[in-house]
Image (spheres, helix red, strand yellow):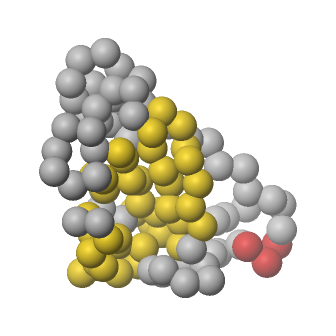
Amino acid sequence: LERATPGVPVWMLLSTGADPIGLNVLGTQLHVTPGPGLVGFVAGFTSGTAPGTGTVTLDLIVPADPSLHGLTMYGQWWVLNVVHQNPFSATAAFSFSLMR
């Protein structure tokens, strides 16, 4: 994640589905499908010192389970928005496929 406010918490949402239109949650569009396949967790805090320079990276450890081969997942970053009216800012959804 890049160009965020420095020093704020960031959440990663992962799901087995995506919603291009999105669902409005607290004034921000949720673009990953809610339901049993949705997992969310705090990914850390943004680094940086000046406005718009906050970044965070995340390494995901995936089990060596053959049944996960070819699974496509969708993700979305959510960032606590301390300088705007809405409590959160979010990225568009992104996808990745698990391969060996």
Residue situated furthest bottom in the rendering? 35
Residue 64 visible, this orientation: yes
Could you tell me which residue is drawn at 16 percent across and 51 percent down? Answer: 85
- Residue 5 location (% of width, % of height): 28, 32
Taking depth in this image into account, of 61 and 98 the one nearest to the observer is 61
- Residue 3 location (% of width, % of height): 26, 34
Q: Quadrant of residue 94?
A: bottom left
Q: Is residue 3 above or below residue 35?
A: above
Residue 72 visible, this orientation: no
Q: Quadrant of residue 59?
A: top right
Could you tell me which residue is drawn at 80 percent across and 59 percent down? Answer: 63
Number of numbered discs: 0
Could you tell me which residue is drawn at 24 percent across and 81 percent down? Answer: 21
Left or right, 41 with reference to 74: right
Could you tell me which residue is drawn at 21 percent across and 24 percent down? Answer: 51
- Residue 66 location (% of width, % of height): 82, 72
